[in-house]
Amino acid sequence: MPIDAAKALAAGPRTGEISWDHKDVQLYHLGIGAGSPATDPDELRYTLESRLHVLPSFATVAGAGKPGVTGGLSMPGIEVELARVLHGGQSLLVHRPIPATGTATATHRIAAVYDKGTAAVLVLRTEVADTEGPLWTNDAQIFIRGEGGWGGDRGPSARLEPPTGEPGRTVERPVRDDQALLYRLSGDWNPLHADPEFAKVAGFERPILHGLCTYGITLKAVVDTLLGGDVTRVRSYATRFAGVVYPGETLRIRMWHTPGSTRVAVSAVERADAPVLADTVVEHT
């Protein structure tokens, strides 16, 4: 069996040092569409080193994204084809604001393996701390088509009750034609996002945008629209990747805001509002 759940869960964690500086943060922000208009003071907070603050979703690529979604496939007990792999969901818990330059220790492990019948889901947990204590905890849910059916734990349902009523705010964010090519420079080199032939083998008409790029675009929209541009107000952020985005499309981001929490739904405008992100919650102060 390509996935040995017992072996994966019993394996010891992998620990290593990661580091980043302002150039990594700026590149990530550009990769999720920051910097337009280029001289807008609100955008300069993401792009100019003298006033830089760090969007919490940068945690998903800090240290060049190691081990990342594809890196999780090299963990003990895991042996699958990359073309069968999709990013199913992502959650982030922020312990402290992320500095623009830092060195930290990252600890990676398989936290769970679920049998969904026609697929398997791996939960790759990354805990990051520096000399002052914990910085963030990331959980990536990795969906592997055709690898379920061994009779294992199905795991909890990620589905939430949909928000009620009309969203309080709706914004649209265009995705550049070269957005995936720019975003992948932050460390996710999966050819699914750049190579047309690989994308066809994986079942897509052309390369798709990284789910984590959409994840970052969405969090930036929430921070800029509802939190006064203050990245330090974000406490946690979780989503389920419900569909793909093709570079060149437009994202429609709907927000239902309440004190301490914002529900979000994201769709692709050009494909009749096809769902992209679902079960999305930003917890904040």
Image: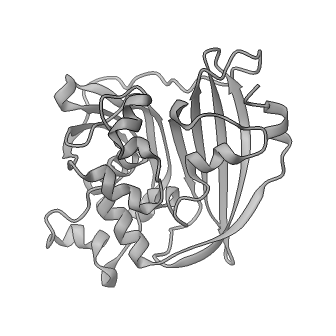
| Residue 273, percent from left and from top | 23, 25
Label total for image: 0
Task: Please tell me in which quadrant of the rendered image residue 209 appears.
Answer: top left
Q: Is residue 162 visible?
A: yes
Q: Quadrant of the C terminus?
A: bottom left
Q: Residue furthest bottom?
A: 50
Q: Residue furthest front?
A: 197
25 or 85, which is in the foreground?
Answer: 85
Residue at the image position 47 percent from the left and 53 percent from the top: 188
Q: Which is more toward the observer, 52 or 227?
A: 52
Name the residue located 67 percent from the left edge and 76 percent from the top edge. Answer: 132
Q: Position of residue 2 (x, y in %)?
A: 73, 29
The correct choice, above or below, for 209 with respect to 266 in the image is below
Residue 267 spot, x, y in % from top left: 28, 31
Please indicate whether residue 253 sits to the left or right of residue 63 in the image.
left
Could you tell me which quadrant the N terminus lies in?
Answer: top right
Viewed as shown, does residue 132 lie left or right of 19?
Answer: right
